[in-house]
Image: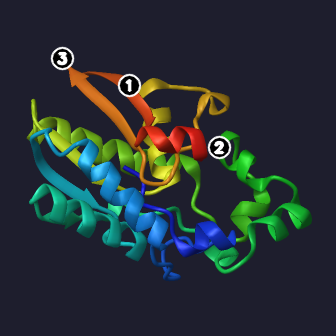
Amino acid sequence: MRHGEAENNVNRILVGRHLESHLTSCGRQQASEAARLIQDIPIKKIYASPVIRTIETAEIVSKILGISYDIDERLYEIDLGNLVGMNYEEIIRKHGNLFLKFYTEEEPTLAEYGVESFSSVKERMTSLLEEIRENYANENILMVTHLDPIKAAISALFHLDPEALYHIRNASLTILKNEGNLYSLFGVNVMNIDRYLND
């Protein structure tokens, strides 16, 4: 699950890991709706990224599902280095669409700013997924994280070209199923039906 809408999403500010950005009232509502979608599914464990917007999302979900959550740093947002605090459109005007290049190649400008590589995000997500597969076979695990770690998991598991990666909506569910050590992608951007019409 991606975190609910946060202040940085509305203001188009890059906050990465360390600059705090809380959920908006809309984001809190989105998190509640997402939790209700899975309320009848037996969830064994919830993991969350250590970033405030994911923690706030996990707290809402945890309360509705009646399950505590654990923090796992592998679910962290990408490290945006010196881009933190900058406006998204400002970056695009200054450097072109660096963020598209983030998924396809090592971009020198991103490296100069100290931005974590997509391959690094894929490695940590793969590590977490393997650990969950080994320790929680046939159990449902919920991970509350960010856009790029979700894209990285999909890319790593299914060897998808970057063009095939989806835009992951706030507080939407990406559903993966492991069967005989093979993953299937059961759903992307699963959310309350009203949001499909309005998002």
Return the x and y of residue 92 as percentages of the image width and height. 84, 61
**Tag 2 and tag 3, C-beta contact below 8 Å:** no
- Residue at 69%, 39% (x, y): give it: 104
Q: Quadrant of residue 4?
A: bottom left
Disc marking residue 185: 1
* Alpha carbon separation for disc pair 1 and 3: 14 Å
| Amino acid marked by disc 1 | Leu
* Alpha carbon separation for disc pair 2 and 3: 29 Å
Return the x and y of residue 155 as percentages of the image width and height. 50, 34
- Residue at 70%, 43% (x, y): give it: 105
How many residues crowd mark 2 within 10 Å: few (<14), some (14–19), many (20+)?
Answer: many
- Residue at 35%, 42% (x, y): give it: 126
Up/down of 151 relative to 66, above or below: above
How many residues crowd mark 3 within 10 Å: few (<14), some (14–19), many (20+)?
Answer: few
* Alpha carbon separation for disc pair 2 and 1: 20 Å
Return the x and y of residue 15 as percentages of the image width and height. 58, 74
Up/down of 90 relative to 42, above or below: below
| Amino acid marked by disc 3 | Gly
Secondary structure found at label 2: helix
Task: List the residue tagged with mark 3.
Answer: 180
Secondary structure found at label 1: strand
Task: List the residue tagged with mark 2.
Answer: 103
| Amino acid marked by disc 2 | Tyr
